[in-house]
Image: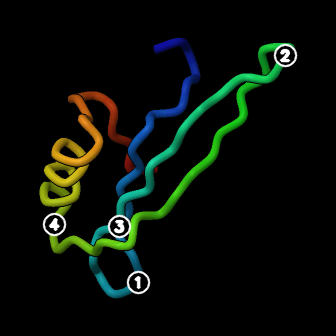
Amino acid sequence: MAQGSIKPFLIQKDASGNFRLTVRTTRYNSIGYPIVSSKLQDEVFETQSAAKAYARKNFNAAAGEYATK
């Protein structure tokens, strides 16, 4: 990944203590400016590991493609 690129899977804890997964896609306009789209998944996970397992199974996520901030 290039310097400063967005990791495609964001895992965050919500107000009720559950973890949520956001899938982000990056595309570039004609002058090379990145445009990031994100979609919060409907599923709610009890642990961060469960969210990562879901991303691996459903989106073919690999190690190093997760962000927490």
Please, what is the three-letter code of the amino acid marked with disc 4? Thr
Task: Compute the Cα span from label 1 to label 2.
Answer: 39 Å
Q: Quadrant of residue 27?
A: top right
Task: Compute the Cα span from label 3 to label 1.
Answer: 11 Å
Residue 55 to residue 33: above or below? below
Q: Are marks 3 and 1 in contact (CB under 8 Å)?
A: no
Q: Considering the numbered disc 1 on the image, is that residue within a helix, a strand or a loop?
A: loop
Q: Considering the numbered disc 2 on the image, is that residue within a helix, a strand or a loop?
A: loop
Residue 31 to residue 39: above or below? above
Q: Residue at x 63, y 46 (%)?
A: 37
Residue beneath disc 4: 47
Q: Considering the numbered disc 4 on the image, is that residue within a helix, a strand or a loop?
A: loop
Q: Considering the numbered disc 3 on the image, is that residue within a helix, a strand or a loop?
A: strand
The mark that comes first in sequence, 2 or 3, is 3
The mark that comes first in sequence, 3 or 1, is 1
Disc ID at residue 60: none
- The reply, left or right, for residue 45 in relation to residue 5 is left
Q: Residue at x 45, y 34 (%)?
A: 7
Q: Could you classify mark 1 by the number of other residues whose Cα lies within 10 Å: few (under 14), some (14-19), or many (20 or more)?
A: few
Residue beneath disc 2: 30
Task: Compute the Cα span from label 2 to label 3.
Answer: 33 Å
Q: Quadrant of residue 5?
A: top right
Task: Give percent across and percent down for residue 3.
Answer: 55, 14
Residue beneath disc 1: 15
Please, what is the three-letter code of the amino acid marked with disc 1? Ala
Compare residues 13 and 51 and report the one nearer the observer: 51
Residue beneath disc 3: 20
